[in-house]
Amino acid sequence: MARHESRERAILAAVELTGRPSGEPGSVFHAEEPLQELAALAESAGAEIVARVVQQRSSYDHATLIGQGKAQEICEMVRALEADLVLIDHDLGGTQQRNLEKALDCRVVDRTQLILDIFARRARTREGQLQVELAQLNYLLPRLTGRGIAMSRLGGGIGTRGPGETKLETDRRHIHRRIKKLEQDLDAVRGSRSTQRRQRQAVPLPAIALVGYTNAGKSTLFNRLTRAGVLTDARMFATLDPTVRQLTLPSRRHVVLSDTVGFIRRLPTTLVKAFRATLEEVKEATLLLHVVDASAPAASEHCAHVRSVLAEIGAEAIPQLIVLNKADLSPAADLESTAQRLSGEAGGAGWAAISAMNGEGLDALLDEVDRRLDQDPVDRVTLLIPHSESALIDVIHGAAVIVERGFTEQGCRIVADMPASIRRRLVSYLEQGGQPVENPVEKSNDSVD
């Protein structure tokens, strides 16, 4: 059999617990759904999938998770298909993993190990690399039992009697020291991020964060809105390190938009803890744009898992707007039904349908974001700019939406929808009687400039 030299050949395996309603912990969404996600993870890690196995059991086997009979079946598949490893869509204990590797005579990688491997490949910044290494060590530490071998034997002479120090004990101490050092480094990163955040907050710019299930199209939307050039890829977790850019809304208000790591079903707790510094960008947001793949059959389940992670990091109370991406791939009737269902499940969060790939619906999305932000409110004002201060007209054009403009003997008379932060700088030019009008964004978004 010809082999693809550059990719490892993998067999995927999952256990479906019978007698449990779909969606319960330990159960399978829809027969093939878990293996579809595991397959996407495996391909992101560079594996070639050669077989898939789903084992139905009433409970997990304590020794091997899948049971001896299924282990023997997979072992024969490993030999026949020349597989390099078996990927298990569950978290394995150290004993289970060792038993499986012995029974299958090949490497066995569980779900958390696979995700950690992908994160290690994707991390580009120093912060991301620190976070991944911390998560890997926290995963490894409780699984060291049985992997160490004695470094010394009984010896002769004073001070040499006794079992001596084992490699296992040495490894444990080394890992504990390394974890402590990584946590200190990440505390320094967190302090640096806090300083950057305070500097941003010194200027009243609302913060908006993109959140969502991995591969929902967050980075494509981020690039479309900000022209940031963030990596976009069909592979899961293509974007790992956070990116922050400034965005100008239709009202000419400026906001800070951040792109974050995608969430996933059963996101390992070690990763949530390790990436807490990164996820603080989400906690500090004024508004969350929850990006959902509208064409995904499991969209509701994806949204539920995102909400679960948001609750875990203390961000569940932040206002959300459901952004149904890939709307061009869904029939209008199905899209409306999906939108109403997801909005209801999110407590009436509201929704907008877009296609980040072709730009469809982005204007309506930005208008909706404008309406939902109460920071730096936009008011309609009338200004009279003297002829001697004509340079201010360019400032107004760049920072406000011009509704009317005309010239008089005294100067240029401008009616504009203007953010409060800009209006305060121009308060001395407010025309008498030209007081602010509330909520101009809802009354008019037309620009005549």
Image (cartoon, rainbow, N blue to C red):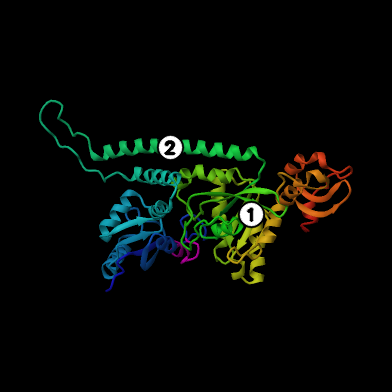
Report the front residue among 231 and 149: 231
Name the one closer to the observer, 121 or 21: 121
Q: Position of residue 45 (x, y in %)?
A: 39, 59
Residue drawn 81% across the image and 39% down it:
428
Position of the C terminus, as image quadrant, is bottom right
User: Which quadrant does the N terminus fall into?
Assistant: bottom left
Q: Can residue 57 be seen in this snapshot?
A: no
State the image quarter where residue 204 is shown. Answer: top right
Q: Secondary structure at mark 2?
A: helix
Q: Which residues are magenta?
A: 28-37
The location of residue 314, given as percent across then percent down, is: 57, 43
Decide: marks 2, 1 in contact (CB < 8 A)?
no
Q: Amino acid at mark 1?
A: Ala
C-alpha distance separating marks 2 and 1 = 36 Å
Instruction: Point out the residue furthest to the left here.
Output: 156
User: Disc 2 residue type?
Assistant: Asp
Count residues near mark 1 (Cα–Cα under 10 Å), then give few for <14, some for 14-19, many for 20+.
Answer: some
Q: Which residue is mark 1?
A: 346
Residue carrying label 2: 185
The x, y position of residue 199, in whole percent, is 60, 38
Please say if 105 is above or below 164: below
- The residue located at (73%, 50%) in the rendering is 394
Q: How many marks?
A: 2
Confirm whether the magenta stretch covers residue 32. Answer: yes
Query: Relative to 90, does residue 175 appear above or below in the rendering?
Result: above
Tell whether 302 sits left or right of 367.
left
Q: Which mark is residue 231?
A: none
